[in-house]
Amino acid sequence: MKLIAVDVDGTLLNSNNEISKKTKDTLIRAGEMGHKIVIVSGRPTAGVVHLAKELAFEKYGGLLSNYNGGAITNFATGKVISNHTLDLELAKKILAETKNLPLEIIIPKEDYIISDRPNKFLDYERDLLKVNTEAIRGLRENIDFAPNKIIFASEPAILEEHLPFLSDTYGSTTTQVRSQRIYYEIMPKGLSKGSSLLEIAKYYEIDQKDIIAFGDELNDETMIEVAGVGVAMGNAVDKIKEISDYVTLSNDEDGIADYLEKFVLN
């Protein structure tokens, strides 16, 4: 039995933000054969539920790892296995001290996503994840819940200009990752997709060597590293290809299905 972990954007989904029929059928067949399929994503839980339904998670089981390792949920039962959040006081401090930076904030909250003002990144999340969004005036000063993560968003050049400040100021108390060229995420210290994957392997009592992880972006680095076999998509960034054990076809060429058919389901 293998633990098959798939990232979502750029990996499970093609460029049309869809699971192709071949990839869907192959992953369902893997589930039918007794392998454990896990969605591991930076998205909030609500943003992957429809994908889990497509992959028949309610029939064959399957866990959802979201917020880049911040929460693990059993899809079939709805049980939250683990949930890691930033300390509320730390979150308040970060939001207050970054108020004057030319960066937008995006914060997942349960089944919707919030920001302190309307912005194109909030609209992007709404359209991509098919979840509700809300701009809340005074959010930075009045946040009253401990978030799983805080996302800073801007155009790549502007974001890069301010990464040293975020890293130098909060690097000792948080984990940080560049999940997309336009996103920089701040999460609880010690969390990652890799730590989440090891937690899931323990839950299923599957040996680390039997983990297969598929990814394409820098926030997939830790799960590629901890997996028995790390598989980079053909469209992956260079660093992910360099550290992977195998480079498969791209997300538009059914890279997940191609690997599984060659090495797991044959």
Image: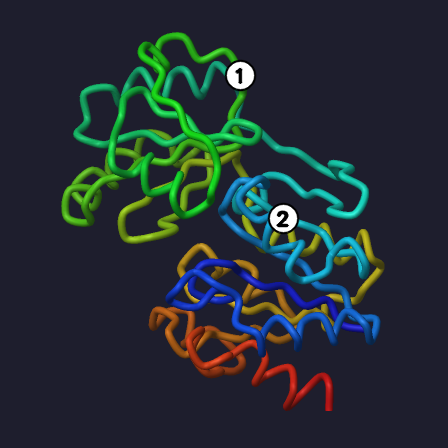
Answer few, some or many: residues within 10 Å of disc 1's Cα (few below 14, many 20 plus, some between 14 and 19): some
Do tag 2 and tag 1 residues touch (Cβ < 8 Å)?
no
Dot 2, how many residues are within 10 Å of its Cα: few (below 14), some (14-19), or many (20+)? many
Quickly name the residue at label 1.
Answer: 145
Q: What amino acid type is highlighted by mark number 2? A: Ser
Specify the quadrant of the image occupied by residue 84. Answer: top right
Query: What's the mark number on residue 65?
Result: 2
Q: Quadrant of the N terminus?
A: bottom right
For the point 20% across and 46% down, which residue is it?
160
Residue at (82, 76) in percent of width and height = 33
Q: Which mark is residue 21?
A: none
Residue located at (40% from left, 39% from top): 126
Q: Position of residue 213 (x, y in %)?
A: 60, 68
* Kind of residue sitting beneath label 1: Phe
Helix, strand or loop under label 2: strand
Between residue 68 and residue 54, name the one nearer to us. Answer: 54
